[in-house]
Amino acid sequence: MNVHEDLTKRLGQQTMRYRVVEFDVNGDGGAPPRYQIALSVSPARISGGKIRRTGQGAPSMFRLGGVGRTTTDADEQRMGALFESPDSRRRFLAEAVLRVADLAFVLGGMSDDLARGLGAVDAEFASGRLTAKLPAVLAAIVALPIRRSGDRVHFEDSDRTDSALHALGRALGDVTDEPWSGWRAPLEDDAPGLLADDGEPRVERRRPLPPRTAHDEQKAWAKLAKWLAILIDGASCGVHAAPIGEGEQQARFGCGDLTMNDWHCAYWRDADDAPFLIRPEGEPVAQRTYTCLVRWRQTDDWLDFCDLKRRPGDGTERRRVEIRELRFDHTVAADDKRAVRLVLDGGRLEPVAHRIEFAVYGQRVVKPSTARPGEAQALDAIVDQFTDLRHILLLPNLNPDAGNARGRRFTDSRPRTLFSRQQTANVWLGEAALVADPNLRRLALLGPVKLPLGVTGATRALIDAALYDTGPDAYRHYRLHDRPLDSLAPGQYRWLEEPDGPVLEIYFKPNFYPCTMLAITKAGTLLSIAWSGPYSNDRAGWSIKGLARELADNWKVEAALLIDEGNDVFQVIAGADDQNLRITARRPRPSAMFVVTASG
């Protein structure tokens, strides 16, 4: 394992981290590989829902166990997922406990029976595994001897603390059997680790105020029910780990898009070697070709298969880990070798399901080239594979909250009227039009596009405020260019008065969006590239296109896949005390995770 590049840069109150780590997963000159890469998948997410984005409001998905109920809450959307690490699990559950305790304190003064009061929102607990534990868990949290000093949480120094924590762990039925009597430290942490949606800084946790209206009270009951559901669900989920027998864990990085977004499929074998074809709800797998990171099984006819799958220009090495094009077929059983087919030169399809340990899709951002090891993929060729277009285009937020709007032009606060309804979530300029029109998506990557005011869902004044407020004056991303005969450059916009009304002409800039990429080099090694930091900030960080060019030009990779983005990005090197060798997940429950282990 080689840590080739490790960059940390401070930007105001935030930090950008970028790191490239290399692993020998294919061996060199006939020698066995030094490392193995495995995939850990959350069992409850194998047939989970997917996030739906229309651009007209917050992204939603059907909540696990919610009996048809949709949610726009990022933590509810990840229910059923395993945790990235034991530490992130403790911090997450501690935050959930304190949220429930705060809400129960406020609402307890308004109801003699909290459990009965939750009856009005019992749809939150449609899943029996949550409902059965509700009364005992709620009673155990109410009994915690919590004392507060400002925003900090402390426990009374009494004999009741350990017994109360033990009772809570018993009520939750913690799947890890971890003794909750030792949870005083994570519960007293002043920032246990949740983040607001869309990468905006999390507001400091403060004790909620008593509801002033019946509507406020109903919202508080619903929030209490939500956090109880998240807590009980989280306690029933363990931690991602390497398969038994794979060796000592050396590194881990996220694969949080699996099942959550369109295109993100995988073929995977569980601990009992049972195969699963994992795909988002409604994914048309029979009509698509997927670029995947594949780990092959070393079958009895391995050498013959290596000759079959070798492509022109390949070396003589027999790679067990590589990036290839696959076709999936959900019409046959997962244990049928036709469930996965390898795309060979000339378009011939070879059944290979029985040869695969795992195969995971990612957008291929570097593709093989005849003149060089690899070249950056043009984004217009793969733009339809992006569910969230903010990953590639800088779309200004039309509905920032009061804490994140910079206040120069936004004269109001949430909720605002967008798409003819009051909205409290982020809404992004142009997303609805881009989602609806595949041709507009391609044009937006290449030059300016025209958006009639009606399709933006906003008023002209609100759009002007959003474009003006995209950054501090010295680093504003969008600037007005009102000369109608000039060509627009990236980051410029203007208003046009046309017969049907005002039209916004805008040249969207590429977004700088945290991400994880996995690449295969000419030598057959695996590169893990990750960066995290401030969104939409071109003083530090990478656009997806820029990072792909960096890999192709300077790292000489043959192919690379985009694996994860945003708050799910993490890259952890086991045993590293230096915090510069840790890119921490801001959301701790990935649907899947890669684990690199040392070969025996």
Image (cartoon, grey):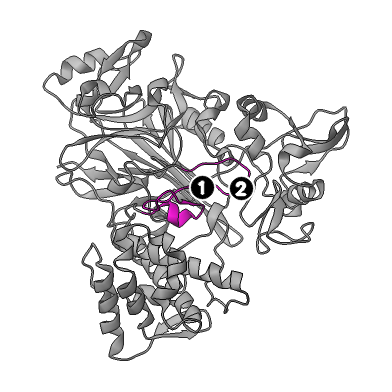
Indicate left or right for 232 with 7 as reference: left
Whether 545 is drawn above or below 512: the answer is above
Say which residue appears at 45% left-offset and 17% top-offset.
369
Q: In the depicted view, which residue is nearer to us: 13 or 124?
A: 124
Indicate left or right for 74 with 173 as reference: right
- Name the spot of residue 284 as percent of width and height, x first: 42, 27
Say which residue appears at 61% left-offset and 47% top-offset.
57
Q: Which residue is mark 1?
A: 60
How far is mark 2 from mark 1, CA to CA?
9 Å
Residue 516 falls within the magenta-colored stretch: no
Q: Report whether residue 470 is seen.
A: no
Specify start and end residues of the magenta stretch as a single range.
Answer: 51-79
Q: Which residue is mark 2?
A: 57
Whether 259 is drawn above or below 414: the answer is above
Amino acid type of the residue tagged 1 in the rendering: Ser
- Name the spot of residue 298 as percent of width and height, x first: 16, 27
Say which residue appears at 58% left-offset and 25% top-offset.
380
| Residue at disc 1, secondary structure | loop
| Residue at disc 2, secondary structure | loop
Q: In the depicted view, which residue is nearer to us: 397 or 280?
A: 280
Q: Quadrant of residue 402?
A: bottom right
Amino acid type of the residue tagged 2 in the rendering: Gly
Q: Report whether residue 239 is seen.
A: yes
Check if mark 2's residue and mark 1's residue have beta carbons within 8 Å: yes
Q: Residues within 10 Å of mark 2 (few under 14, many from 20)?
A: many
